[in-house]
Image: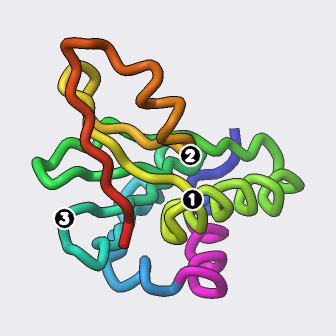
């Protein structure tokens, strides 16, 4: 497992170079982890990034405070940092550009999708779905 402080330091540098707006709301913790977030333009949603357990977690915080929608990006060695950060950044860019959108299912809660049509095809008759974009 990589050193927690190193994982956080690499993320901080990456965000400074590629997504500096996240650093205005960054918190460093005693265990070497950090987290940061960015509110959507509508101020309803936030994207958060954390460095818990020597990995990167990118997630959504919904208007009601639910932050269960997230995904992990794990560097196993220092050589993995560029690839892992590029993958995380690709998802982040897709969210911010509207290629990946959020939705709320009355049966499953909040999550994200890149295919609204497929999401609607899988919708159950007793389920309501609302879609939200970052913008």
Marks 1 and 3 close (CB-CB < 8 Å): no
Q: Looking at the figure, which quarter contains the C terminus?
A: bottom left
Answer with left or right where residue 11 lies relative to residue 83.
Answer: left
Where residue 62 sits: x, y (%)?
A: 22, 51
Q: CA distance from mark 2 to mark 3?
A: 20 Å
N-term-proximal mark, 2 vs 3: 3
At 36% from the left and 74% from the top, the residue drawn is 26
In the depicted structure, whether residue 72 falls above or below residue 65 = above
> What element does badge 1 sit on?
loop
Q: CA distance from mark 1 to mark 3?
A: 18 Å
**In front: mark 2 or mark 3?**
2
Marks 2 and 3 close (CB-CB < 8 Å): no
At 31% from the left and 13% from the top, the residue drawn is 124
Crowdedness of circle 3 by 10 Å Cα count: few (<14), some, many (20+)?
Answer: some
Which dot marks residue 99?
1
Crowdedness of circle 1 by 10 Å Cα count: few (<14), some, many (20+)?
Answer: some
In the rendered structure, which segment of residues is drawn in magenta?
8-19
Residue at the limit of the structure toward the top, as seen here? 125
Which dot marks residue 71?
none
Residue under numbered circle 2 = 114
Residue 12 in magenta stretch:
yes
Quadrant of residue 25 within the rendered picture = bottom left
At 73% from the left and 46% from the top, the residue drawn is 75
Answer with left or right where residue 72 lies relative to residue 60.
Answer: right
Answer with left or right where residue 39 lies relative to residue 101.
Answer: left
N-term-proximal mark, 1 vs 3: 3
Residue at the limit of the structure toward the right, as seen here? 79
Which dot marks residue 44?
3
Residue 80 versus residue 96: which sits nearer the camera? 96
> What element does badge 2 sit on?
loop
Residue 56 versus residue 113: which sits nearer the camera? 113
N-term-proximal mark, 2 vs 1: 1
């Amino acid at each position: 497992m990589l050193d927690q402080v190193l994982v956080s330091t690499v993320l901080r540098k990456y965000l400074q170079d590629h997504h500096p707006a996240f650093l205005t709301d960054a918190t460093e913790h005693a265990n070497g982890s950090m987290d940061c977030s960015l509110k959507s333009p509508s101020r309803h949603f936030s994207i958060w990034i954390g460095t818990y357990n020597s990995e990167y977690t990118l997630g959504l915080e919904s208007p009601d405070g639910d932050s269960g929608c997230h995904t992990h990006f794990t560097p196993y060695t220092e050589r993995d940092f560029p690839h892992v950060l590029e993958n995380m950044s690709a998802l982040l860019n897709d969210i911010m550009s509207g290629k990946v959108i959020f939705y709320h299912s009355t049966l499953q809660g909040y999550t994200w999708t890149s295919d609204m049509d497929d999401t609607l095809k899988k919708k159950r008759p007793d389920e309501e779905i609302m879609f939200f974009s970052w913008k």
